[in-house]
Image (cartoon, rainbow, N blue to C red):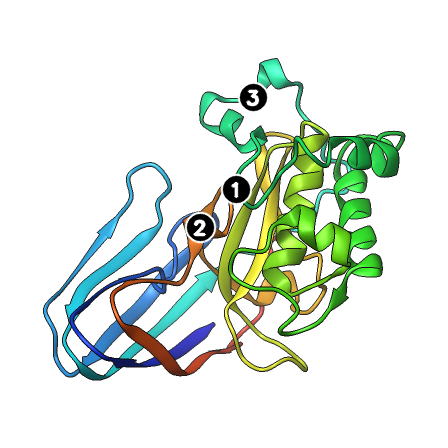
Amino acid sequence: MQIHSTLEYLVDGPAEFVFLIHAATGMGQSLVDEQLLIEPPTAYRTYCDAQSGNRFLRFQALAGPLKVVYRATVDRMIEPADVNAQEAAIHDLPDEVLHYLMPTRYCESDLLGASAAELFGQLGKGHSRVQAICDWVRGNIDYRIGSTIATTTAREVFMQRAGVCRDFAHLSVTFCRALNIPARLVSGYATFAEPPPDFHAVFEAYLSGRWVMFDPTGMSPLDQIVRLAHGRDAKDVAFATIFGPARMVAMSPDIVLLNRYVAV
């Protein structure tokens, strides 16, 4: 898959930028090549977080227009979904997975525990229950651009029954955690049939000893998503965090599917 992402900002004064726009490595995904262009030319630093593997870009920009262009070619090994994957008992979870059971700012699994139990508590455990969560979210939450803001939480989405991709993912993660299924948010580049080009948010559930990706919006095939970052909720995987007076004026995170291979 080939990525060509352009982000444009108008900076009103000195500002610090932290981006998560570099394609991740690992988890069946590898880089063939990548290039980064910043206009005007600016000194920058990239680093890989030792715990998550997320790849960060940092720099300071002065007042004026700013353009960030990221290009990459990425190979992905697509594993067929294991519909028989099972949930793990809490005492069997690896230490690094355990914290993905905890409620967070955007995923209030403690507050939605009763609702999760009522909706999904009687279902058979495993992949089918996580898929049932996705189906419920897709069937009961309207995908409506502009219906939520950056601080909207899963509980608010559950109440108002509308949101965008990150809200769908947050609510799904919240239901999973409320049922003692570790779950985490994943950001990525994705192909879309109808909505305007944007970064995409999906989630992963921990089943049968590995992380399994789900898209509760159904907007992009899973094999056409290039993962960027994962974390507990949106605050961990925001594609841009800005400290200072700057505003986005244009974005086009495009992805082109070059070849399709499926692991057998």
Q: Residue 93 carries which label?
A: 3
List x then y, in percent, for residue 191: 58, 75
Sort mark 2 into few (<14), some (14-19) or many (20+) by Cα contacts within 10 Å.
some
Q: Residue at x 68, y 69 (%)?
A: 219
Q: What residue type is labelled 3?
A: Leu
Vertically, is 261 above or below 53? below
Any part of residue 65 in sight: yes
Vertically, is 169 above or below 96? below
Return the disc, 2 or 1, that comes first in the chain's sequence. 1
List x then y, in percent, for residue 78: 58, 56
List x then y, in percent, for residue 196: 58, 82
Vertically, is 66 above or below 212? below
Q: Residue at x 77, y 42 (%)?
A: 83
Q: What residue type is labelled 2?
A: Lys
In this rendering, position of residue 62 left or right of residue 100: left
Q: Which amino acid does label 1 sit on?
A: Arg
Residue labelled with disc 2 = 235
Sort mark 1 into few (<14), some (14-19) or many (20+) by Cα contacts within 10 Å.
some
Check disc 2 and report its element: helix, strand or loop. helix
